[in-house]
Image: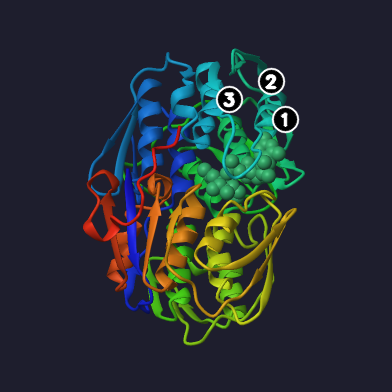
């Protein structure tokens, strides 16, 4: 199992390039089930989650081939398979995005329920209600959702639940409705740029979708989706990776430019960074941060887009752990997403967590320790804290990190960070004083 060894205290400086968005690429890849003919995608990061979905699509008769570093060629070669097995769906919830396309294109989808998750309760009721409202007959059988319909029919769908709109629920419904007969309106739709990217991808294949980026999306169903040009469709840059890199520079009191980023997708994040006392400048395709002093305490609440993304809440908390005062951090999207608090405290932070908020009492310095990643974004927060902490930090279980960041340590090293990946079973001498733990059961 790989770990990261970080020697903290080095102010970062330099320029890195944003990678393609994981959360945009996944539903776009799932929607390829709908398409007749080969498609090309550009800007698809080489990540564990992307490779997991490629594997699942392979079982579903869709060939996914990586052409160059970030280009994929995808072609559906067999429209008969309809079953997405538990073993693959449980690894990544976004796999559930194949359900809508399967029912819409093949008349049937049998997809394992995704099950539990480290960041809290993550039901799929909104996905199922939407697909049922489009006319599918749905039942649960041995842990699998079985959905079938001769042809879906347009309807009014509600995709917003008690914690706001469901992002992948919107993706599932939007993809399914493109081939439904008649008009569908998605009320309370997710406004995330990743949904806009998906909708524009579908439109490039002949879908008729309007209202992308608003909370009401209208779709007029078409008979078929097919590529009209051989040009690769461009996946947007990853705003979460970009935010993580900017926060990495800020937490070390350094500076960094992320090129290839879309500042307009990060408005709330950049405002929050300014609120923390970080100097931010941006122009088309570039964002630069400079942080010379200790962060200012700032109250933050993660919210659906255009708010601060829940996927950056943990990384912001790492920054605020070093603030000159107390900040209150909440998460309106995943109210239980505070697994990182205990590990940040092991690095010397003073964070109290109760109900759906955390009181972050800033400390002047963090101190390196061995910590355990519990989920994807929590892992990133621990890496950030390690970059700022005195001496050495070892982040274990970084397979979580690899799900969503393509070699984060390489980008951090480009900014001057001292970060090294190593295999725990071949531990370097410097790490030998850390007791080896058994792998998780
Ligand atoms: C997506 C992102 C994830 C991000 C999250 C919120 C992908 C692949 N993943 O996850 O990185 O953290 O959006 O921005 O894009 N909910 C329900 N019923 C449902 C579905 C969701 O109540 O059927 C609730 C969830 O428990 C949560 C909230 O709605 O409280 C938002 O979840 P959702 O947007 O669905 O998250 P994902 O799409 O799974």
Secondary structure beneath disc 2?
A: loop
Task: State the image quarter where residue 130 is shown.
Answer: top right
Q: Point out which mark residue 227 bears.
A: none
- Which one is earlier in the sequence, the residue at label 2 or at label 3? 3
The answer to whether residue 202 is left or right of residue 305 is left
Q: Which residue is mark 2?
A: 135
In the image, residue 274 above or below residue 412: below
Crowding around mark 2 (Cα neighbors within 10 Å: few <14, some 14 to 19, many 20+) is some
x and y percentages locating residue 376 in the rendered image: 48, 49
Secondary structure beneath disc 1?
A: loop
Q: Which residue is mark 3?
A: 113
In the image, 17 versus 363, the foreground residue is 363
Q: In 3D space, how far apart are the residues under numbered discs 2 and 1 (Cα atoms)?
A: 8 Å
In the image, residue 282 above or below residue 72: below
- Which one is earlier in the sequence, the residue at label 1 or at label 3? 3
Quadrant for the C terminus, please: top left
Res 285 seen here: no
The answer to whether residue 297 is left or right of residue 411 is right
x and y percentages locating residue 56 in the rendered image: 40, 27
- Which one is earlier in the sequence, the residue at label 2 or at label 1? 2
In the image, 432 versus 104, the foreground residue is 432
- The residue at 47%/74% (across/down) is 251
Q: Which residue is mark 1?
A: 155
User: Mark 2 or mark 3: which is in front?
Assistant: 3
x and y percentages locating residue 168 in the rendered image: 58, 40
Quadrant for the N terminus, please: top left
The answer to whether residue 393 is left or right of residue 431 is right
Secondary structure beneath disc 3?
A: loop
């Amino acid at each position: 199992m790989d770990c990261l060894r970080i020697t903290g205290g080095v102010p970062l400086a330099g320029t890195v390039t944003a990678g393609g968005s994981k959360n945009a690429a996944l539903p776009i890849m799932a929607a390829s089930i709908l398409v007749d003919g080969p498609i090309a995608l550009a800007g698809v990061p080489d990540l564990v989650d992307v490779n997991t979905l490629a594997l699942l699509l392979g079982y579903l008769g869709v060939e996914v081939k990586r052409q160059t570093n970030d280009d994929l060629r995808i072609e559906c070669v067999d429209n008969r398979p309809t079953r997405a097995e538990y073993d693959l769906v449980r690894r990544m919830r976004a796999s559930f995005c194949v359900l809508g396309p399967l029912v819409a294109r093949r008349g049937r989808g049998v997809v394992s329920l995704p099950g539990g998750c480290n960041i809290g309760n993550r039901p799929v009721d909104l996905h199922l209600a939407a697909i049922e409202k489009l006319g599918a007959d749905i039942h649960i059988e041995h842990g699998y959702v079985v959905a079938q319909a001769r042809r879906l029919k347009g309807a009014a769908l509600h995709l917003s639940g008690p914690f706001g709109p469901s992002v992948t629920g919107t993706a599932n419904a939007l993809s399914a409705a493109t081939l439904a007969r008649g008009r569908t309106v998605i009320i309370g739709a997710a406004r995330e740029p990743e949904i806009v990217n998906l909708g524009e991808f579908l439109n490039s294949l002949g879908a008729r979708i309007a209202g992308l980026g608003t909370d009401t999306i209208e779709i007029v169903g078409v008979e078929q989706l097919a590529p009209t040009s051989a040009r690769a469709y461009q996946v947007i840059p990853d705003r979460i990776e970009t935010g993580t890199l900017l926060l990495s520079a800020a937490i070390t009191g350094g500076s960094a430019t992320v090129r290839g980023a879309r500042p307009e997708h990060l408005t709330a994040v950049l405002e929050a960074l300014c609120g923390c006392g970080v100097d931010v400048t941006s122009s088309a395709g570039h964002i630069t941060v400079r942080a010379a002093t200790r962060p200012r305490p700032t109250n933050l609440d993660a919210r659906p887009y255009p708010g601060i993304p829940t996927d950056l809440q943990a990384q912001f908390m790492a920054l605020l752990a070093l603030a000159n005062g107390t900040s209150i951090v909440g998460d309106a999207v995943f109210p239980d997403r505070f697994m990182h608090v205990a590990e940040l405290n092991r690095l010397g932070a003073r964070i109290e967590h109760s109900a759906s908020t955390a009181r972050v009492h800033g400390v002047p310095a963090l101190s390196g320790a061995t910590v355990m990643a519990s989920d994807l974004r929590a892992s990133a927060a621990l890496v950030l804290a390690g970059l700022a902490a005195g001496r050495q930090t070892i982040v274990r279980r970084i397979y979580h990190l690899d799900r969503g960041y393509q070699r984060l340590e390489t980008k951090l090293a480009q900014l001057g960070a001292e970060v090294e990946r190593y295999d725990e079973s071949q531990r370097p001498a410097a790490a030998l004083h850390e007791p080896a733990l058994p792998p998780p059961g």
